[in-house]
Image: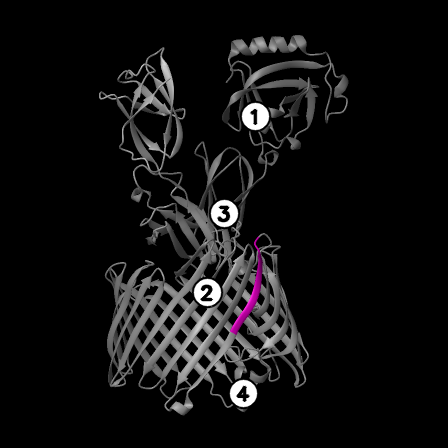
């Protein structure tokens, strides 16, 4: 509410200087209006809330206006108001049928109730997509060496994987070298195979990838993937954890005053935010899948609460409305991938396309073309209201052998405590898939079906699941049909002790049933024990130590009995900064075997080349300037200590997610200074980044200060360095001043001797000068 005395003075001055007419904006004829009835300065209330400011109310042609500026500051969209211009100041019309205006002249208040559609719209997102950082020039050479020897076999192989990267470009080449020792020396063989050569360009802003060279086709959910050499261009957001591409629910509402919103899904709070007055649209990006019920609770600052119930369904098979997922590829199909380096055959072209028509409907198509095969297919994903997700996919193929088709239907219903799914697919006798023409007779069944249902929280039984899998083959294939029933129950018995018991029945096999029991007990976050028992005379007990630390020793020791023979196994993983060594020994009756595997890499980044762990994800070279033996952490997990130069390679940085790198600054010298000990990066996959933590190594210096006559300065005189008045160093009783945190080089010292007397002196520190050597400086 305004101050009455000053308001009246201001109003008088306003009336004295106001012209007898007003220029109009948006109200025709207001330019020559002389019928100004009254002006007032009043304290402003909007929708029952004191705005803690005054507003000028003016009346023109019996219509009330207030300054647009006070409305604009209160989340109003002034473009939705009719306006006039008075003395260069815009005024907004509030004499509207849906706006309630109350003038309280005695209290000098103007109370206005304005609907939300006059206010600014708000689009609130829970998390906005970030762009990953582009790396500099670097590379790595992964090597996995494996050797196994036992009573039945002896073999060795080495896989070499080369990666070179710069900005958004990544070159990859991998090769495998094998040697197998059979029962006789004459049966030994060795070979080498080029597995992959590719050049990849990533475009993070466009969410797309272009890959040249060896490729794997896009998984469409209807046909099988295949290897080929050529190019593939398409979206990559389905594999990016930072981009929400599925149909996360969007919640709309309105608030007259500042409020808070809570989103509760199936009884659990999933989202909380503050909102301004007006209409809002919230993209929740909630971590929820399946069918559920959401409650949107809006509570304003006056304590009023409204609750809106909304049924929701979230599935990754449904794209966001208007979002397109696509892939275009062409080249030559590759056969015998792991056995031959250059078995490229027929040319082909392929296209895959899916688009979110609405948040409940996604449609798509696939098209494949080669000299011997042409095929096309349709993809349809549909949410059935309050039921679940229904999918209908079909494909048609044309080849020299004839025409064929396949049809697949699937239904999923996921609730908070139970899930239900049914899927069946039919293949006609002459249906063919690209890249599998030679395997069609042995590969494709006539029909395959899957049914599953699971329920959690059942008394005594805990979590119960049932599944049925069926594959029916035509008689010409000479393959047996499969019909497998499985029932499993799992629950927690006591603290840290869990049990799982299952029963399976194969109607097409001679040994037609199997019962198994599993128990697991966790001693702590590192040690656990596992027991497995089946009704086919097989049992095993294993003790395991497994840590998430990058350096250390993990192991597993087990013993049991299988097929009337005693069994035993010992395995260990020795994790070091230069790689991981796996050792394993197996004993079954009188037969034994052992294996040795080493995973490592030669990594190059910047000017650093080192032996490191294998590069399977993003990685970083962390540099803590000239600070050896300092602990470095990835996402608050200890990775290891820096080398003598202050560097360490940190691996397993997950692509397209924020990764936190830090070090223990308490391990630095007390004189050292750092601006930060924690940094966050978002990497690309299998790229390397240099993350530097500059450390300013400082020292202390002690000296005596005298004046131009050689006399010691007064004790208690205050010394500041380089104009920093926050740190003051006094001259002590022994006429010596000690200053901390100095770097090598030149520094200006200001000395305040008394209220009226001061002097200055220059201090030069060299690297070879001892910090504890006292010297005398003349202050002028």
Q: In the drawing, does residue 345 fall left or right of residue 724?
A: right
Label 2: few (<14), some (14–19) or many (≥20) C-alpha neighbours in 10 Å: many
Q: Mark 1 points at which residue?
A: 112
- Residue at which label 2 appears: 141
- Left or right side of 91 for 493: left
Residue placed furthest toward the front: 709
Which of these two is toward me, 282 or 301?
282
3 or 1: tag closer to the N-terminus: 1
The stretch of residues the image draws in magenta is 195-204
Q: In this view, does 347 lie above or below 747?
A: below
**Relative to 324, is 332 above or below?**
below
Closest to the camera, between mark 3 and mark 1, is: 3
Distance of label 2 from label 4 (alpha carbons): 48 Å
Using the image as rendered, state which of residue 98 and residue 445 is in the foreground: 445
| Label 4 vs 3, first from the N-terminus | 3
Mark 4: which secondary structure?
loop
**Residue, disc 3:** 127
The residue indicated by pointer 4 is 474
Mark 1 surroundings within 10 Å by alpha-carbon count, few (fewer than 14), some (14 through 19), many (20 or more): some
Alpha carbons under labels 3 and 1: distance apart: 35 Å
């Amino acid at each position: 509410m305004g101050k009455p005395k000053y308001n009246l003075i201001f109003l008088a001055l306003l009336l004295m200087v106001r012209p007898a007419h007003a220029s109009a904006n948006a109200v025709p004829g207001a330019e020559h209006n002389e019928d100004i009835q009254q002006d007032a300065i009043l304290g402003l209330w909007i929708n029952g809330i004191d705005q803690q400011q005054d507003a000028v109310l003016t009346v023109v042609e019996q219509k009330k206006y207030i300054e647009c500026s006070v409305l604009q500051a209160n989340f109003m969209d002034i473009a939705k108001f009719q306006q006039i211009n008075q003395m260069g100041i815009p005024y907004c019309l509030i004499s509207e049928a849906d706006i309630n205006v109350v003038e309280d002249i005695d209290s000098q208040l103007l109370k206005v109730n304005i609907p939300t559609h006059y206010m600014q719209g708000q689009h609130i997102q829970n998390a906005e997509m970030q762009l990953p950082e582009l790396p500099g020039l670097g590379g790595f050479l992964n090597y996995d060496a494996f050797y196994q020897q036992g009573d039945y076999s002896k073999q060795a192989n080495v896989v070499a994987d080369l990666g070179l990267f710069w900005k958004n470009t990544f070159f990859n080449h991998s090769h495998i070298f094998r040697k197998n020792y059979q029962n006789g020396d004459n049966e030994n063989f060795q070979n080498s195979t080029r597995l992959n050569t590719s050049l990849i360009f990533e475009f993070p802003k466009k969410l797309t990838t272009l890959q040249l060279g060896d490729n794997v086709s896009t998984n469409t959910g209807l046909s099988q993937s295949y290897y080929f050499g050529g190019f593939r261009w398409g979206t990559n957001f389905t594999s990016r954890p930072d981009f929400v591409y599925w149909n996360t629910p969007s919640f709309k509402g309105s608030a007259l005053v500042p409020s808070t919103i809570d989103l509760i899904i199936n009884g659990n709070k999933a989202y909380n935010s503050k909102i301004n007055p007006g209409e809002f649209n919230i993209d929740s990006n909630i971590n929820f899948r399946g069918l559920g019920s959401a409650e949107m609770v809006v509570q304003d600052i006056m304590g009023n609460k409204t609750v809106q119930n909304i049924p929701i369904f979230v599935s990754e098979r449904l794209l966001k409305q208007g979002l397109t997922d696509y892939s275009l590829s062409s080249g030559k199909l590759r056969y015998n991938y792991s056995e031959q380096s250059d078995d490229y055959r027929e040319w082909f072209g392929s296209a895959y396309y899916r688009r979110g028509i609405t948040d409940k409907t996604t449609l798509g198509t696939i098209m494949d073309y080669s000299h011997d095969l042409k095929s096309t297919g349709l993809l349809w994903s549909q949410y059935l209201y309050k039921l679940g997700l229904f999918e209908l996919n079909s494909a048609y193929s044309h080849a020299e052998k004839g025409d064929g088709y396949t049809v697949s239907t699937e239904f999923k219903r996921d609730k908070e405590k139970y899930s239900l799914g049914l899927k069946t697919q039919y293949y006609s006798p002459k249906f063919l898939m690209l890249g599998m023409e030679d395997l069609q007779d042995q590969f494709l069944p006539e029909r395959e079906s899957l049914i599953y249902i699971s329920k959690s929280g059942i008394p005594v039984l805990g979590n119960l699941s049932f599944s049925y899998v069926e594959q029916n083959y035509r008689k010409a294939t000479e393959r047996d049909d499969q019909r497998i029933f499985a029932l499993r129950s799992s629950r927690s018995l006591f603290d840290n002790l869990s049990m799982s018991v299952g029963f399976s029945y194969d109607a097409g096999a001679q040994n037609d049933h199997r019962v198994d029991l599993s128990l697991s007990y966790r001693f702590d976050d590192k040690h656990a024990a596992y027991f497995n028992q089946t009704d086919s005379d097989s049992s095993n007990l294993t003790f395991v130590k497994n840590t998430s630390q990058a350096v250390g020793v993990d192991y597993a020791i087990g013993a049991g009995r299988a097929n009337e023979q005693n069994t035993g196994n010992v395995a260990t993983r020795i994790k070091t900064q230069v790689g991981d060594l796996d050792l394993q020994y197996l004993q079954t009756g009188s037969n034994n075997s052992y294996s040795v595997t080493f995973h490592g890499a030669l990594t190059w980044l910047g000017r650093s080349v080192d032996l490191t762990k294998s590069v399977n994800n993003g990685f970083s070279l962390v540099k803590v300037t000239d600070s050896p033996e300092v602990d470095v952490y990835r996402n608050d997990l200890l990775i290891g200590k820096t080398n003598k130069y202050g560097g360490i390679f940190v691996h397993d940085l997950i692509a397209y997610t924020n990764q936190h790198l830090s070090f223990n600054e308490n391990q630095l010298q007390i004189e050292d200074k750092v601006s930060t000990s924690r940094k966050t990066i978002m990497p690309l996959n299998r790229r390397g980044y240099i993350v530097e933590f500059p450390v300013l190594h400082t020292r202390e210096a002690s000296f005596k200060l005298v004046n131009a006559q050689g006399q010691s300065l007064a004790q208690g005189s205050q010394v500041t360095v380089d104009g920093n008045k926050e740190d003051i160093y006094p001259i002590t009783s022994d006429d010596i001043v000690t200053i901390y945190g100095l770097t090598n080089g030149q520094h200006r010292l200001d000395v305040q001797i008394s209220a009226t007397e001061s002097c200055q002196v220059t201090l030069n520190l060299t690297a070879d000068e001892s910090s504890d050597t006292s010297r005398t400086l003349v202050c002028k």
